[in-house]
Amino acid sequence: MLQKTWNILIEKSRFFADLLIEHIEISLIAIFIAILAGGLIGILISEFAKSAKPALGVINFLYTIPSISMLGFLIPFSGVGNATAVIALTVYALLPMVRNTHTGIMNVNPDILEAARGMGSTQMQALMRIKLPLAMPVIMSGIRSMVTMTVALAGIASFIGAGGLGVAIYRGITTNNAAMTMAGSLLIALLALAADLLLGIPERRMTKRKYGKRRSGKRNTKKTFAAAIAIICIFVLAFGAFRGREQETIHIATKPMTEQYVLGEMMDILIEQDTDLNVELTQGVGGGTSNIQPAMESGEFDIYPEYTGTAWNMVLKEEGIYSESMFGRMKEQYKNDYDMEWLGMYGFNNTYGIAVRKEIADKYGLETYSDLQGVSDQLIFGAEYDFFEREDGYDALCETYGLNFKETMDLDIGLKYKAMEQGEIDVMVIFTTDGQLSVSDITVLEDDKGFYPSYLCGNIARSEVLRKYPQIRASIEKLAGKITDEDMAAMNYQVESLGKEPREVAKEFLKELGLIG
C-alpha cells in the first residue's frame, strides 16, 4: 500500500499540488479570520468579565456540533463551496483562540497592572503595553493548536464542493482507490505537523523568555505576531488575486459517483478543446442533487450531470413514478421555474436495482423483490444516505413490496460493495451501471412490480450561461446518445477495479468516438 501511495503521489503530482494549494488557501483564510475575531472576543471578555461566561458557553456549544451537521446547517445560507467551508472552519477555530487569549490576559500578575495604573497608564495602554505582551506565550499556544486543528479539519471541505486535499480522500473512497485516500490523508497529516512545528518555534521562544528580559522581548513578541499576520495576509491576497484573474470560466459540478467523475472529465475536455473557455470542475459534491441544485440556482455552478427520475422527484418535488413520456413537461418546468435547460442526453439509463449476497439468494431462493417479503426481517439493508430520504427511496420500496428489514445501514456509495463483501449487509441498492456488478459475488433481483422509474442521464445547464456562451451547447451535444449502459458500466469498472483515473478513462472513450485527437 505504501508503494502504491508513493506511486500515485508521483504520477499525479500536479493534481495533489493543486489540492495542496487549495487546502492551504481555505485553511489560511479561516485561520486569519479566527485570529482577528477570536483575539478580539478574547480581549473583550477579559476586559468585561461579566460577558466571559456566556460568551465562552456559546463558543463551547458551537464547538460540540459535528462538522457534517455544521455544514448542513450553513449550506442553505451560504451555499456550497469555499465560503461555507471557511465559515465552518472559522467557527471551530474560535474556541482555542478565544479561550487562550482570555486565559493569557486573565493570568497577568495583578501587581504589575496595579503598578501601571499607579504610574498613570490608561486601560488601553495597560492592555497594549502590558497585558497582551505578557499574555502572548499563552495566545501563541492557542494559535498553534488552532492552526493545526484547522489544517486537519479542512479535509471536510470537499464534502460540500470546496477544494483541498479532502477531494483526494473522498474521491478515493468513492472510486475504491485506497492509495488515493491514503495519499490525501498523508498529505493533510504532514501539512498539519509542519504547521505545528513551525509555530512551535516562536511559542517556545516566548515561553522560555525570562521576566527580566521581557521588556526587550516585547518588541520581538509583537514583531513575531505581526509577521505571522502579515504572512497570512500576503497568502490570502495572493490567492485572491489569482482567483480574481480567472475569467471566462465554466463551473461544472458532479455528484460523488464514479460515472459522474468520468462524465465531468468528458465535458471538461470537450469544452476546453472546442472553445476558448476555461473549465473549473468540482468533483464529488457531497449530498449530490440536494446541494448542487441550490448552487446552480445561485450561480455557483453552471452545468452538472443529472438523472431524469431524480430531477422529477427531488428537484421538482413531483410525486409518483417518473417515465420518459414526462420529459417534455419536466424540461418546460425547469425552463419556467429555474431558467435551466436539459441538453446532451447521454443515452444510458442508470436506474436503481436491489442486490443480495449470493449465499443469501441461494439460501432463500430469492429471484425477485417480492421474494424478499418473507425473509426481510432477518436481513440488513444498506444504501447511500440520500436513498433513505428520497420520494422513491427506502420507505416507498418497503411499502410497495411489504418489506421490513431487520436493520438498515447508511453507507457511502463507494463502500457498499465492500460492506456486502465483508458480510456487514445482506441487501443493498445498486445502480445498473455499477462497474463492480460484473465482478462481485451478488445476485441482482428482478423488479417484478416495476417500482423503479427511468433514470436517463443528461446535463442541466443554466440558460444564462448557454446564452452567453452558445458554443458550449455544441460541445456537450457531441455526447448525446453516445453512451450505452454497457459503456458506462465498463468505464466505471476501469476506474473502480482497474485503478484508472476518471480523466484517463474519459479520454480513451472520447478517442474511441473520434471526438478528440
Image: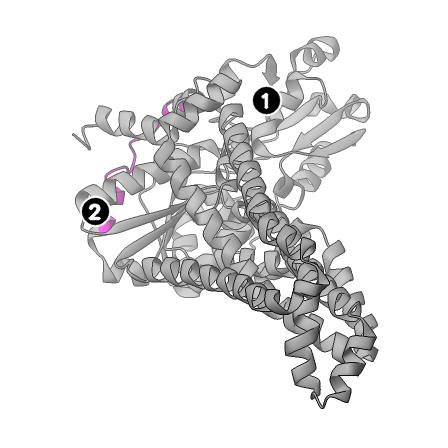
Which amino acid type is marked by label 1? Answer: Glu
Verify whether residue 482 appears in magenta. Answer: yes
Pointer 1 or 2: first along the chain: 1
Residue 122 lies, in percent from the top left, at 69, 88
The residue lying at 61 percent from left, 20 percent from top is: 445
Q: Is residue 122 above or below residue 383?
A: below
Residue placed most toward the observer, 353 or 159: 159
For label 1, the SS is loop
Q: Is residue 188 above or below residue 294?
A: above
Residue 116 visible somewhere in the drawing: yes
Residue placed most toward the observer, 87 or 68: 87
Q: For this view, does 2 lie left or right of residue 371?
A: left
The residue lying at 24 percent from left, 45 percent from top is: 271
Identify the residue position indicated by label 2 in the image. Answer: 474
Sort mark 2 into few (<14), some (14-19) or many (20+) by Cα contacts within 10 Å.
some
Q: How is the image coloured?
A: one colour
Residue 238 lies, in percent from the top left, at 36, 59
Identify the image quadrant of the C terminus.
top left
Residue placed most toward the observer, 167 or 272: 167
Which amino acid type is marked by label 2? Answer: Ala
Residue 299 lies in quadrant: bottom left
Residue 427 lies, in percent from the top left, at 68, 24
Q: Which residues are magenta?
A: 472-488
Mark sitting on residue 446: 1
Q: For this view, does 410 lie left or right of residue 441?
A: right
Q: For this view, does 61 lie left or right of residue 443?
A: right
The residue lying at 67 percent from left, 71 percent from top is: 132
For label 2, the SS is helix
Verify whether residue 494 appears in magenta. Answer: no
Residue placed most toward the observer, 349 or 4: 4
